[in-house]
Image (tube, grey):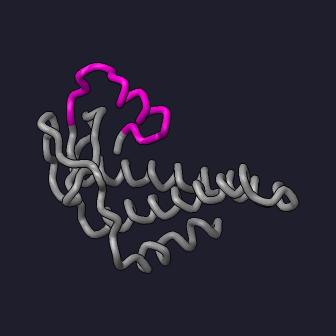
Amino acid sequence: MSTFIKLLPLELADIHEYREPDREIAPEDNIAGDMSPNLMKLYTLSIIYARRYAEAKIELVYGKPNNDQNLAARAAELDQKTRALVEIFWIAVKDEFSLWDKENIGVRKGFKIVWFERQGPNFGDFLNDILGEGRY
């Protein structure tokens, strides 16, 4: 079994402070419910990994050129692990709230899970999709 999978329960158990989502509840949001502590931990861990990835990427672009190969591998590793954690989070959300039939779900302040109907593309959605923040 991979080290990542073995250490995942330990990393989740080690989280005692949660990273709250930044987005406010919008008028078009339908509240599905509140995140459980397990979802809050998984959300927080995915944010931690995303930050590590962003830091590695910045170091790769602007850092010292002598360690680029190791740093590039580390950035690729963190990118893939972040994507996996985010996907696991959304699967867990859909399971916990029975949202399998909803295409657009999100997290909001107060650890709320919401679903919404997309009103049509706008520039903000376009930017969020490019930046990988389409569901948050």
Looking at the image, residue 118 sits to the left or right of residue 60; the answer is left
**Does 99 appear above or below 111?**
above
Number of numbered discs on residues: 0
Q: Position of residue 87 (x, y in %)?
A: 45, 48
- Depth check: give the residue in front, 88 or 86: 86
Q: Quadrant of the C terminus?
A: top left
The part of the image, by quadrant, that contains residue 37 is: bottom left
Looking at the image, residue 50 sits to the left or right of residue 100; the answer is right
Q: Position of residue 93 (x, y in %)?
A: 30, 52
The residue positioned 72% from the left and 53% from the top of the image is 62
The residue positioned 43% from the left and 72% from the top of the image is 12
Question: Per the image, is 118 magenta?
Answer: yes
The residue positioned 28% from the left and 19% from the top of the image is 120
Residues rendered magenta in the picture: 116-134
Q: Position of residue 9 (x, y in %)?
A: 47, 73
The part of the image, by quadrant, that contains residue 36 is: bottom left
Looking at the image, residue 61 sits to the left or right of residue 83; the answer is right
- Depth check: give the residue in front, 28 or 13: 28
Looking at the image, residue 23 sits to the left or right of residue 28; the answer is right
The residue positioned 16% from the left and 48% from the top of the image is 32
**Does 133 appear above or below 49?**
above
The part of the image, by quadrant, that contains residue 66 is: bottom right
Question: Per the image, is 16 magenta?
Answer: no
Residue lying at the far right in this picture: please name it. Answer: 66
Q: Position of residue 125 (x, y in %)?
A: 36, 30
Q: Quadrant of the N terminus?
A: bottom right
